[in-house]
Image (spheres, grey):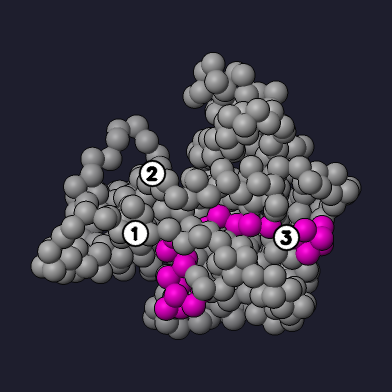
Amino acid sequence: MLDFKPPKDSPFVIALVKLLLPAIMKVPLHDTRVEVVGDGLERFRALNGVRTVICPNHANHDDPEVMFAFSNLVGQDFNFLAAREIFEWEHGWRGFWLQKLGCYSIVRGAVDRESFKMTKSLIAANKKKLVIFPEGEVSRQNDTLLHLETGVPQMAFWAVDELAKKQQMEPVFIVPLALKYTYRDNIRDELERSLYKLEERIGLRSSARDPLYQRLSAISGELLVTLEHEYNVKAASDASRNDRIIALRLAILKNIASFLQIDLPLGQSQLEYVRILRNALDDYIYDSSDEEVTAYQKKLHDEKTKKIKGFYRDLDRVVTFIAIYDGYLREHLTQERFAEVLDRFEMEVFGKRTVKGARRVFIDVGRPIDLLPLYADYKAARKAGLQKVTDDLGEQISTMLDALDKKRPAVFVE
């Protein structure tokens, strides 16, 4: 049985966080404001009392706080599904508070029966709406959506199954949400400050007169050289930077797969390999099997667990360079996209990122997807039914992200 962390909703803790929310958004989140566009609030409130799974894109580590602020705006409390490892952060204190706020865990990619059971129960009970980030991890891409798996629609349809067993053929909705982070002011000074600190740490010299893009590109190149040496990757003399990035990512992925004795399927993207390997790590680390083991067997398992936890950092490196290769590192970047790349480099070099200025997060509410009319098709052809809902969800979020791009004039970094 996997090490499940159930929700332990505390009305007192939730009320306290609501009281402190303005200060949280002002100080730790550097004056982040949330704005729901159009008639999104009214359309969302129209689902009051209806079983609903909320599915936002997951571009930023601050998304949970933003979604809590959204819940405050609509006047409803939510439950949240979160990756199991988050509950271990800060020596377990993060998990303690998350559970009090209504969060519960899932081990990604595993048959986490307790988590699945809790999801079905929460949706069927209909006491609160449930927030699930369908990308499964933080994409760190404010403008685009990662490929979505069918997991969220599957769990929602399981809840419909539960209701059908009780002869309660009632609607269950999936609501797409798009979150778009923008900076309210020109943040060039902060971008230059971040560049300087990175250059100083990795031993690069530049002039303040050099274009910011040129300095960012130089940092990327220096990190690439360092990581190639660290992972013993020999670049061909005529290899382009993109070719070298691909080779580095693949070398990291193959090293982890070899250690875990996993065969990576042919024809899949490197991001899909990241998901496969991260799921395997989660499955091993958080498996608290009831099978009896000797003290020595437990000791060996603990030693291996300690070692493979380091692979999470390797996978983060792969994700960092996936986004950069896919077009984030180019000239004429918006200041938001430039800041995202810097965030990645700061995490790599310093282990933490900085918020570059006061932000406004635009939220758009999509068309609710009612699963009840789709239930017969799902029962007749499960895979096709799940894919249809997943495609609708992804298309709506992507379309809303594109539209939100036009909500403010772009500030470009030359």
Q: Position of residue 87 (x, y in %)?
A: 47, 67
Q: CA distance from mark 1 to mark 3?
A: 28 Å
Q: To which residue does mark 1 refer?
A: 286
Q: Are marks 1 and 3 in contact (CB under 8 Å)?
A: no
Q: In front here: 385 or 393?
A: 385
Q: To which residue does mark 3 refer?
A: 77
91 within the magenta span: yes
Residue type, numbered disc 3: Asp
Q: Which range is magenta?
A: 71-94
Q: To which residue does mark 2 refer?
A: 111
Q: In front here: 173 or 120?
A: 120
Which residue, as the protein is rendered here, is positioned at the far top?
380
Q: Give the quadrant of the C terminus.
A: bottom right
Residue 369 shows in the view: no
Picture residue at 37% right of the left edge, 46% below the top: 110
Give SS at disc 2: loop
Q: CA distance from mark 2 to mark 3?
A: 28 Å
Q: Position of residue 12 (x, y in %)?
A: 69, 75
Quarter where residue 50 is shown: top right
Give SS at disc 1: loop
